[in-house]
Amino acid sequence: MSGTTNIDLARSALKRGGRWLRGALRAVEDERWDDVVYSSQMAVEQASKAVLIALGVEYPKEHDVSTAFKEISRIKGVPEWFVKIIDDLACNISELAELRGLAGYGYEKGLDAEYFKDYAPIAYERAKKHYEACARLLFELYDINLT
């Protein structure tokens, strides 16, 4: 992908996160609770990686990038409103990453979609707020606008 910038990659990652978020909403509507959690995690992961890519922060090639995400608070130019919520966002990343495997493969442990029924709407709301915060930051800093 010659000529691709970090901002181009960030835009692509954010778009992908938006698609996962829409999938999570559809899963809520269909009462596919395990899919809600899995898709919410993927939305959070992609939106978080979009921010990390745009800011040039190295991150591990794994689902839980919360430690790298916390580094954002040290970067000059990151708005104060975002710095104030970084710990909450990092918590979203790690909590959903921890549940991702269970949501995707819980059947191996005898779990079905109902296992996630109570948590799924919470996961979706957290993912939505997380995505919106990341999208707002990318818009403010780099004029990345997906609408």
Image (spheres, rainbow, N blue to C red):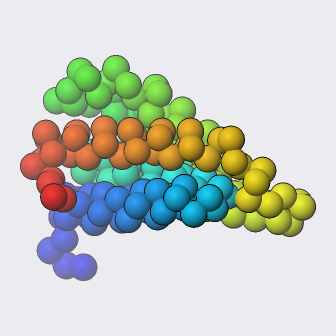
Q: In which quarter of the image is residue 141?
A: top left
Q: Can residue 18 be seen in this view?
A: yes
In the picture, the quarter occupied by the C terminus is bottom left
x then y, percent, for residue 133: 31, 38
Q: Above or below — where is 78 with respect to 2?
A: above
Q: Which residue is drawn at 26% across and 46% down?
A: 135
x then y, percent, for residue 32: 63, 61
x then y, percent, for residue 71: 39, 33
Q: Residue at x 50, y 46 (%)?
A: 124
Q: In this view, does 42 lie to the left or right of 80?
A: right
Identify which residue, 58 or 115, lies in the foreground: 115
Q: How many labels does the image show?
A: 0
Q: Is residue 38 visible?
A: no
Q: Above or below — where is 95 with respect to 102?
A: above
The single residue placed furthest to the right in the displayed view is 110
Q: Is residue 25 left or right of residue 18?
A: right
Q: Which residue is drawn at 46% across and 57% down?
A: 25
Identify which residue, 106 or 63, lies in the foreground: 106
x then y, percent, for residue 134: 30, 43
The single residue placed furthest to the bottom in the displayed view is 1
